[in-house]
Amino acid sequence: MNATAPAGTSSWKTPLLMLMLMSATMQLSFASWWTLLNNFAVNEIGFTGKEIGIQQSIREIPGFLAFTAIFILLILKEQTFAMLSLLALGIGVGITGYFPTMWGLYFTTILMSIGFHYYETAHQSLSLQWLPKDQAPAMMGKILSVAAMAQLTAYGLIFLTWKTLNLSFELVFAIAGSITLAMVAFLWISFPHFKTAIPQNKKLVLRKRYWLYYALTFMGGARRQIFTVFAGFMMVEKFGYHVHEISALFLINCLFNMIFAPKIGQYIGRFGERKMLTVEYIGLIGVFVAYAFVSNPWVAASLYVIDHAFFAMAIAMKTYFQKIADPADIAPTAGVAFTINHIAAVFIPAAFGLIWLVSPAAVFLIGAGMATISLVLARLIPLDPVEGREWIGKLTKPAPAE
C-alpha cells in the first residue's frame, strides 16, 4: 500500500501521518506514566525491588497475550482496534494517581498495559502493511522521530513544572490520560479508514521459516526488561534520582531519537539489518557490563542514555521480517511476535527482582549474556533477506506452504 493519501481524501490524510500521530498520542500518555512510575511506586506506595518486579511482570501479561489480537480482528478492523487500544491506554494512565496503593497500581497497570500492548501490536502490523518495503526503514525512522518529539514534550513539561508548580502525581497522570483521549477523538473523526492491499490471515500463524525472527524477538524482549525495569529503578534506588532528574534523562533520550532516528532508519536501508543489529548488540554488551559495576551517578546517567540510543536500531528487526514474510502473514504474526517478545518479560521482572535483592550487578551481567546471544543470532541474517532466504544457512527459494 502506498503511504500517500488515497484518492478522494485530503492530501494530508495519509497512512504515514496517521501512524505518526498515533505514535505521538501513545507516547504522550505512556511517557508521562513511565516518568512518574518509579517515584510514584517508591515515594507514594513504598515499593522495593520485589514489588516493582511483580508490578512490571503484571505489566507484561497483556503483551504475553497479544496473540489474542487476531481473534479480536475477526470482529474489528485493525485501524479501529488500534484506536480502541489507545483509548484504554489513556484511561489507565489517567486514573493511576487516584489509586496510590499496591493493589491500586497493579490494577491501573493492567488496564494501561492492555491498551499499550494491543496498540503496539496493531501499529506494528499496520506499519508493515501500509509502508512500502523500499521506504519502510526511513519512514519508520520518521515515525520514531515524531514519537520522540511527543516524549520530549511530556518529559520537558514534567521537568520544567514538577518542582516549580509543585505538581501532584494525581494531576499529571490525569492530564496525560485526558490528552490521549482527546487525540483519539481527533484521529477517529479526521482520518478515513485506510484499506490494505492484501487481506490478512485471520488465524494464528507460526512458520518454521520465521524461526530466526522469533528467536531475535524473544531475546529482544528478555534483555529489554533489564533496561526498562532495572536500569531506571537503579537510578532512583541506588543514586537517588528525583522525578525532575529522571525526566531530564528521558529528555536527552528523546532528543537523540528525534534527531538521529530518521538517520538510523536510512542507515538500515543502506547497510542492511545484519550489520545494524550487530552494532546494536555489541554496544549493549558493553553497556550492561558497565551497569554492573557503575558507582558514579553521572556515569550511570551516561550509560542510561547510551543504552536507550540503541533502541532505534530495533527498526531493523521489523524490516527484516517485512522482507521475509508472506504479506498476508503480517497481522497475525505481529500478535504472535508480541507474545514471543513477552514470554521472558512475564517472569524476568519478578524473578530478577529477587536476584536484585541479593546482587544488582548479577542482573546486568545476565543482561550482557542475553545481548551476546542476540549478537550470535543477528549474524545469521542474510545480507539480502527475502522470502525463501530467511537465514544464511537457507539458500533455496521458493518457500513451501506450511
Image (spheres, rainbow, N blue to C red):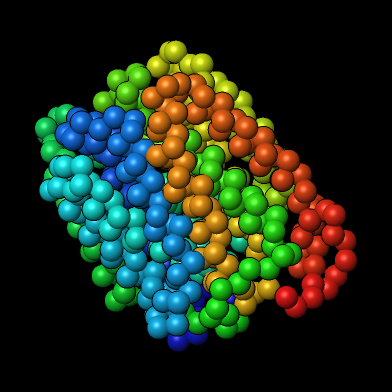
Query: Looking at the rendering, which quadrant does residue 8 occupy?
Result: bottom left
Q: Image check: 126 left or right of 179? A: right
Question: Going 65% across and 52% down the picture, which residue do you hit?
Answer: 215
Query: Looking at the rendering, which quadrant does residue 75 occupy?
Result: bottom left
The quadrant of the rendering that contains the C terminus is bottom right
Q: Image check: 120 left or right of 382? A: left
Position in image of residue 252 (x %, y %): 41, 33
Position in image of residue 204 (x %, y %): 56, 73
The quadrant of the rendering that contains the N terminus is bottom right
Question: Going 51% across and 16% down the picture, which residue do you hit?
Answer: 293
Question: Going 67% across and 49% down the picture, which residue do you hit?
Answer: 268
Of 197 and 56, nearer the camera is 56
Residue 160 can be seen in this image: no
Position in image of residue 107 (x %, y %): 23, 53
Q: Image check: 100 left or right of 260? A: left
Of 298 and 103, nearer the camera is 103
From this view, report whether residue 280 is shown above or below residue 69. above
From this view, report whether residue 79 is shown above or below residue 61. below
Question: Going 11% across and 32% down the picture, which residue do you hit?
Answer: 166
